[in-house]
Amino acid sequence: MQVCVLGSLGDDLTIVEKEKGADVVEAVIDILDQSCMFDNDRQMLRRIAKVETDDGEASDTFVVDDADYFGGIWRVSVEAKERVRTWMDGWIDE
């Protein structure tokens, strides 16, 4: 069962660039929970989104930094994003 938040046109807001809000955060976390990617993270991703950007509602959530990258609702650094992408590429190729 996939959980998503649908906008007025039926779009899955979890994949819409720069979408924000508690509903979007909760839907993304539900998708990750269902994937079993994180074993009992004790709501860590939920708390990070709230503290870092108030669920994307903070005025500077999507302000671009020096690397032309904003990190999204969770403020993921460019380095962390690239490490995950490299790890996923290796995992998928196996």
Image: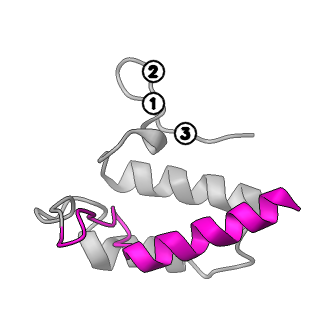
Q: Residues within 10 Å of mark 3 (few under 14, many from 20)?
A: some
Q: In the rendered structure, which amino acid carries the disc numbered 1?
A: Leu
Horizontal arrangement in the rendering, residue 93 relative to residue 81 (left or right): right
Give the percent coordinates (x, y) of residue 32. Answer: 64, 59
The residue under the point 34% across, 63% down is 73
Circle 3 sits in a helix, a strand or a loop, which is it?
loop
Q: In the rendered structure, which amino acid carries the disc numbered 2?
A: Gly
Q: Nearer the viewer, residue 8 or 80?
A: 80
Residues at badges 1 and 3 in contact (C-beta under 8 Å)?
yes
Q: Quadrant of residue 37?
A: bottom right
Is residue 83 on the magenta stretch?
Answer: yes
Residue receiving disc 3: 4
Q: Quadrant of the C terminus?
A: bottom right
Which sits earlier in the primary sequence, circle 2 or circle 3? 3
Residues at badges 2 and 1 in contact (C-beta under 8 Å)?
yes
Q: In the rendered structure, which amino acid carries the disc numbered 3?
A: Cys
Residue receiving disc 1: 6
Horizontal arrangement in the rendering, residue 17 relative to residue 12 (left or right): left
Give the percent coordinates (x, y) of residue 55. Answer: 31, 63
Residue furthest right in the image: 94
Residue receiving disc 2: 10
In the figure, 11 relative to 68: above or below? above
Circle 2 sits in a helix, a strand or a loop, which is it?
loop
Give the percent coordinates (x, y) of residue 72. Answer: 33, 62
Give the percent coordinates (x, y) of residue 22. Answer: 36, 56
- The segment highlighted magenta reads 65-94
The residue under the point 31% across, 52% down is 21
